Amino acid sequence: MNNTNKIKHLEMIENIIERMAKNCFQLKAWTMTLVVLIGGLAAKDTERKFIIIAFIPIIVFWLLDTYYLRLERQYRILYKTVTEKRDDEIDFSMDLSQIQNMSISDSKKICPLNCFLSTTEIVFYLPITVTLGVIIYILNIFG
């Protein structure tokens, strides 16, 4: 049996999944860069309340990261769907709406709230948010 079409379609989906993962990584790098930059400017500036602005990139990038994680998970489900097709059924579609008969666990995985609160998001963004909150609290007490 020749699975050339299926292999090419799966490679296309793999490339998209890889791009989504890279986007998530770059968003995390930009978050750290901007938070450190804003923190440095606030420490140098006489008005220390400027550091509160650092919450903006954290929230924006957390939401963007959640969006890309959700897309990545949807493409993983599409990948699984394509693996179950016969070669003559391959249409090279990247339309995520064609995903049918999704399991309950898969539908939970792509829920925006579950993506927002996923381990990879919480482990990165929550400590930054808490640390920034502690710094602001300390500056208010001693500043």
Image (spheres, rainbow, N blue to C red):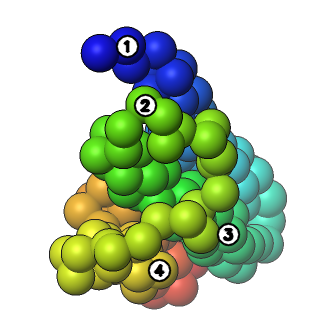
Front in this rendered view, residue 21 or 106: 106
- Identify which amino acid the numbered label 3 is placed on: Val
Direction from residue 93 to residue 105 in the image, left or right = left
Residue 135 in the image: above or below residue 25: below
- Residue that badge 3 annotates: 60
Instruction: Tell which circle, 3 or 4, labels the residue nearer the N-terminal end.
Output: 3
| Tag 4 residue | 112
Foreground mark, 2 or 3, reads 2
Residue at 41 percent of width and 81 percent of height: 111
Spatial CA span between label 4 and label 1? 38 Å
Q: CA distance from mark 2 to mark 3?
A: 41 Å
Q: Nearer the viewer, mark 4 or mark 2?
A: 2
| Label 2 sits on residue | 87
The CA span between labels 1 and 2 is 7 Å
Under mark 1, the amino acid is: Asn
Residue 45 versus residue 132: which sits nearer the camera? 132
- State the separation of the CA atoms marked 3 and 4: 15 Å
> Residue 50 appears at what percent x and percent y?
75, 72
Q: What residue is pinned by disc 1?
A: 2
Mark 2 belongs to which amino acid?
Asp
Residue neighbourhood size for the residue with mark 1, other residues' Cα within 10 Å, grouped as few (<14), some (14–19), many (≥20): few
Q: Nearer the viewer, residue 99 or 67?
A: 99
Mark 3 and mark 1: Cα distance apart in space: 46 Å
Secondary structure beneath label 2: helix
Expressed as whole percent of the image width and height from the top left, the position of residue 119 reads 24, 62
